[in-house]
Amino acid sequence: MTHTCLGNLKVTWPNQVWQTDITYIPMAHGFMYMAAIIDVYSRKVLNWSISNSMDTSWVLELLEDTIARSLKARNP
């Protein structure tokens, strides 16, 4: 699979490239935000989180947790 956004990089194995997505979920009194980290090769959602605010610390915590999970899975 080749991605033009990545300079025609060929993604040929899991965990080679991750992507993120943030979306909002309308609620009765405002919004909740959902962030997900997705493996480009397998298209598997590796981790996700929901928050009532879109703080940098929230997304960084999600990324750090995903990295820790990935490392733990490789070295049980």
Image (cartoon, rainbow, N blue to C red):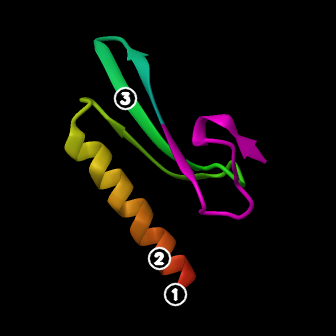
**Residue 47's x, y, as percent?**
49, 53
- Residue at label 2? 71
| Labelled pair 1, 2 in contact (Cβ < 8 Å) | yes
Q: CA distance from mark 3 to mark 1?
A: 32 Å
**Which of the two marks, 3 or 1, is nearer to us in this view?**
1
- Residue at label 1? 75
Position of residue 56 relative to residue 61, above or below, is above
- Residue at label 3? 33
User: Which residue type does callout 3 highlight?
Assistant: Tyr
Marks 3 and 2, the one that precedes in the sequence: 3
In this rendering, would 43 be left or right of 20? right
Q: Residue at x 28, y 50 (%)?
A: 60
**Residue 63's x, y, as percent?**
37, 54
**Magenta residues, start to end:** 1-20
| Labelled pair 3, 1 in contact (Cβ < 8 Å) | no
Pointer 3 local density, CA inside 10 Å: few below 14, some 14–19, many at least 20 = some
Q: Residue furthest bottom?
A: 76
Q: Residue at x 54, y 51 (%)?
A: 18
- Quadrant of residue 27 within the rendered picture: top left
Q: Is residue 7 magenta?
A: yes
Q: CA distance from mark 1 to mark 2?
A: 6 Å
**Which of the two marks, 3 or 2, is nearer to us in this view?**
2
**Residue 66's x, y, as percent?**
43, 61
Q: CA distance from mark 3 to mark 2?
A: 26 Å
74 or 25, which is in the foreground? 74
Q: Residue at x 53, y 44 (%)?
A: 19
**Residue 13's x, y, as percent?**
71, 64
In this rendering, would 53 be left or right of 70? left
Q: Is residue 58 magenta?
A: no
